[in-house]
Amino acid sequence: MVQITRAADLLGIGANGGAWVAPLGTTSPGDPEIQPLAPWAPLGAISDDGLVQGFDEDSESFTPWGFTAPIRTTITSSLRTFSLTAWETARTTVQSLQYRLDVADLQPTAGLTTYAETASPAPDRRAWWFVVLDGDNFQRGFYVPQGEITERSDVTNKQDEAIAYEWTITAYPDEAGNTVYHFDRVPETSDYTGS
């Protein structure tokens, strides 16, 4: 009988985490275990659905005449997204993202914030930073140098639900052609071989 080695610390659970946003061109905070500083702004509480890392790829297969199996497959589209639901909708940063406004445009006057939504919104790319925690332990971080909210859900206002902004953020290539930079914790276990 084959003995299979298992290591519990190779199993990660995204029990907690956080998300931050900063102006386009802001560099990565660097260390996911340290709270990001300005200009990074926190999104605050995220729903218990957590953070969803999306992969959307299309491919084209080439099968020669007379064959039944392809001899080559080419990736024709490769998209990376992150989805989350922001609960702190009164947070200025969160409002600025929902309505594609500059934070400076949301400063209250005599306790009242007023703004208008345009019928022709301009692109609103920003830098994004996501951290996933397993309890108090860091699991992984994602730096998106150029990301934009490309999907927004309807917003429900009712007594038995929190008002929430559900977003999908699309990651675009930076100057180096990269969409997402990963920061992963390597478990310290004698059984870890890197595979």
Image (cartoon, rainbow, N blue to C red):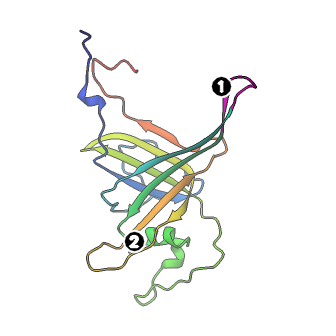
Q: Write down the region rendered in magenta.
A: 62-75
Residue 128, given in percent of the width and then of the height, sits at 50, 53
Residue 173, given in percent of the width and then of the height, sits at 63, 46
According to the image, label 1 marks what residue?
68
The residue carrying pointer 2 sits among few (fewer than 14), some (14 to 19) or many (20 or more) residues within 10 Å by Cα, namely: few
Amino acid type assigned to the residue bearing label 1 in the image: Thr
Image vertical order of residue 67 relative to residue 170, above or below: above
Q: Is residue 63 magenta?
A: yes
Does residue 161 appear to the left or right of 79 in the view shown? left
The residue carrying pointer 1 sits among few (fewer than 14), some (14 to 19) or many (20 or more) residues within 10 Å by Cα, namely: few
Image vertical order of residue 11 relative to residue 157, above or below: above
According to the image, label 2 marks what residue?
91
Query: Main SS of the magenta segment?
Result: loop
Q: Residue 76 — which label? A: none
Q: Which of the image's four quarters has the N terminus? A: top left
Residue located at (53% from left, 43% from top):
180
Amino acid type assigned to the residue bearing label 2 in the image: Arg
Q: Which of the image's four quarters has the C terminus? A: top left
Q: Compare residues 21 and 7 and report the one nearer the observer.
A: 7
Residue located at (35% from left, 43% from top):
33
Residue located at (55% from left, 73% from top):
101
Question: What is the spatial separation of the Cα atoms under label 2 and label 1, in whole angstroms?
Answer: 57 Å
